[in-house]
DNA sequence: ACGGTTTTTGAAAGCGCTTTCAGATAGCCA
DNA sequence: TGGCTATCTGAAAGCGCTTTCAAAAACCGT
């Protein structure tokens, strides 16, 4: 290597490196590194000199070099089905909270409810060298877990519970069943479901199953024409409820996969001259910002996204740092009662 | 360095590196690198051997080493005021779209409408070695631009226009003025504003200024009691409109900083027995998902978030790759007319 | 078959940081 | 002050990849 004399090193274009700081402070790069990290066992005068030199030069350590050397990238990845979905955004935001405190960065990616895409995105993150990975749900591409295992980094699944893998979530079937039971307690007998896409989506699937089982447990059944699967969003909710009405005998209550869908269903119901909750009770999922303000305010299953995120973040950090972490954390979902649910009309048989 | 004999290298715990692939394919690491990247000028048989070896071993290049070597981190950072805000999420999502196509990763951070925090987060990203940076707005911590400049990476500001810095955005003052003019054309004379926090927020500030100027241009003025600043969200909108009514003579129309705020204002108006748009016209900002479905559907200024994101992404990629890029891109905001606006009542003077 | 090209290829030098290891210093007690 | 221990410190070896440079191999026209 061509070793330049010390005095011509202030090349303007080059951003300063540890070597420059060392030179300026009259120490070695080893000492610079010690000061800028743990500081353990460096004499005060040298430490100050290094600090000042770093300050003066505006030194910023090169993350790649540090990552290469420590084998720690100081980042964790998260792949969520839809990065624009409120619930996932909240989780990402709270995971990031925790990570940030531990000095880690969150890199989020979008899987678009597609297993292949999820695999691609996860692989991409793995290549980047993330130190941990957060996924949503328990259904993934068959190769995904093998790939994660090979990379040797910790992984945690969220939003649903899993027998196989570390997870932070809740029992989607049970919480949806609770909503169904609540409706049946009110006297409803014809209960419908409008869910988002269920393909490769264990949360959606489990919720419908839970509802069907709760109905069965009381001798009722989820009629096929009352079991609707649509795309997410308010428009989806309208379409879904329209389809349901087209099916014949209308339900007296519907449970929806998200509050957006519930909102859409309510709009469509009103457009058809049905009053909520008079003619139709509606329950959503997620407790979105707007839900308390709808007309009527929406009964919904609140998912504690922030708690899920915090727990998932803590779990990953712990395992990255070699500390023990619980394999399964259950964060209970909560049924928030508002005015969109009521007993069915007497004549609704 | 202790050079292990070639035959004991299948240590299970260690993930494979280029050296392993090279050995298995009977080539040098240089060739491995050539194959895995550009592939230029490698004989077909060797190329295949490398490909196969990499496949067999499940080789994944170490991103940190690559970044260190190429001086490219292949990631760009984005710092937005609120990562849970719909408009910013949409921009992030569309920036990521573009970056992903170019092989780059997006790392998003949250500044919480605080200049110090924004500086901290941006610095954090800079330390990571991001190759480019996206910011929101034209008001930043005094040290921020210096720091970015020192790191030598391209930066682009979004959502507003700037004289000083590269930007992709729109004229917040002009678009808000357009809304005000529309209301005045309908005959409104008492127009109010409910904006989110304006501190260190040039978008919010510019909108109010634009409205005030539009009013002034027609001999009207924005009464102080009709100029309300609140926190974001539906609750904020309700509070804001309540405050406005407490101010004395009620306005016949309000322009709100977001559709959430507008929604809140509409709720509060109705609670006070005012009909929209009969007694009060309401205009929002952003054209949120739910806005067409409100009752009445909300007139709003649609911000083309996806276009902003795409343009910002393209701009950064171009500059990272050393290609020229336009300094200022203006993405027009659009006034979407729906049913929440109408002429004022005749007797509303 | 041979000299001159044109391709391919591998050795080795980094990229900038951390960390080990041994030597240098400082501190302490007698 | 000397000797021994406890602290500090710097040289140097990596981390795993890319890339230059020169040597080796393949190709070509005669």
Image: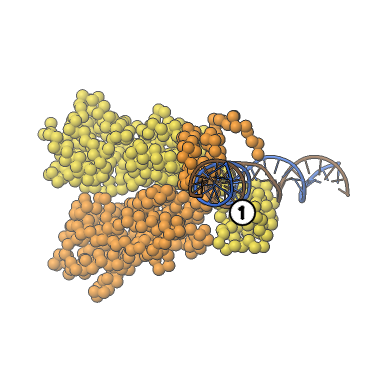
Chain colours: A yellow, B orange, C blue, D brown
**Observer-nearest of B134 and A275:** B134
**Residue A288 sits above or below residue B237 on the image:** above
**Residue A234 sits above or below residue B195 on the image:** above
Give the quarter of the figure containing the N terminus of chain B: top right
Q: What residue lies at 28% left-to-right and 65% top-to-bottom?
A: B175
Work out which residue is located at the far left of the displayed protein and give it: A347
Residue A30 in sight here: yes
**Observer-nearest of B253 and A116:** A116
Quadrant in the rendering for residue A23 = bottom right
Q: Position of residue B272 (x, y in %)?
A: 21, 56
Q: Position of residue B130 (x, y in %)?
A: 48, 52
Give the quarter of the figure containing the C terminus of chain B: bottom left
**Residue A14 sits above or below residue B27 on the image:** below
**Observer-nearest of B32 and B244:** B32
Q: What residue lies at 12% left-to-right and 44% top-to-bottom?
A: A273
Residue carrying label 1: A18
Quadrant in the rendering for residue A169 = top left
Q: What residue lies at 47% left-to-right and 34% top-to-bottom?
A: B52
Residue A99 in sight here: no
Q: Secondary structure at mark 1?
A: helix
Q: Position of residue A261 (x, y in %)?
A: 24, 42
Q: Position of residue A172 (x, y in %)?
A: 32, 33
Q: Chain of mark 1?
A: A
């Amino acid at each position: 290597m061509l070793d330049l004399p010390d005095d011509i090193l202030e090349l303007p274009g080059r951003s300063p490196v540890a070597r420059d700081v060392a030179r300026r402070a009259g120490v070695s790069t080893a000492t610079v590194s010690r000061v800028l990290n743990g500081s353990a066992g460096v004499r005060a005068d040298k430490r100050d000199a290094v600090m000042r030199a770093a300050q003066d030069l505006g030194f910023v350590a090169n993350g790649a070099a540090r990552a290469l050397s420590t084998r720690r990238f100081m980042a964790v990845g998260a792949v969520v089905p839809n990065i624009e979905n409120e619930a996932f955004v909240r989780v990402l935001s709270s995971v990031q909270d925790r990570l940030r405190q531990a000095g880690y960065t969150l890199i989020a990616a979008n899987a678009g409810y597609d297993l292949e895409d999820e695999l691609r995105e996860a692989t991409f993150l793995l290549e980047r060298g993330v130190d941990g990975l957060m996924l949503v749900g328990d259904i993934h591409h068959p190769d995904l877990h093998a790939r994660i295992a090979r990379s040797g980094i910790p992984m945690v699944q969220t939003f649903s519970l899993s027998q196989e893998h570390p997870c932070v979530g809740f029992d989607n079937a049970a919480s949806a069943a609770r909503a169904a039971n609540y409706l049946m307690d009110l006297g409803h007998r014809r209960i419908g479901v409008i869910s988002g896409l269920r393909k490769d989506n264990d949360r959606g699937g489990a919720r419908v199953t839970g509802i069907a089982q709760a109905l069965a447990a009381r001798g009722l059944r989820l009629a096929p024409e009352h079991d609707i699967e649509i795309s997410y969003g308010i428009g989806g909710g309208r379409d879904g409820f329209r389809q349901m009405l087209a099916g014949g005998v209308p339900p007296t209550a519907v449970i929806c996969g998200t509050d957006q869908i519930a909102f859409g269903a309510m709009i469509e119901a009103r457009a058809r001259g049905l009053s909520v909750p008079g003619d139709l009770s509606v329950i959503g999922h997620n407790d979105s910002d707007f839900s308390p303000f709808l007309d009527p305010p929406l009964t919904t299953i609140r998912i504690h996204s922030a708690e899920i995120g915090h727990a998932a973040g803590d779990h990953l950090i712990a395992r990255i740092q070699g500390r023990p972490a619980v394999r399964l954390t259950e964060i209970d979902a909560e049924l928030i009662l508002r005015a969109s649910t009521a007993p069915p009309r007497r004549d609704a048989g």
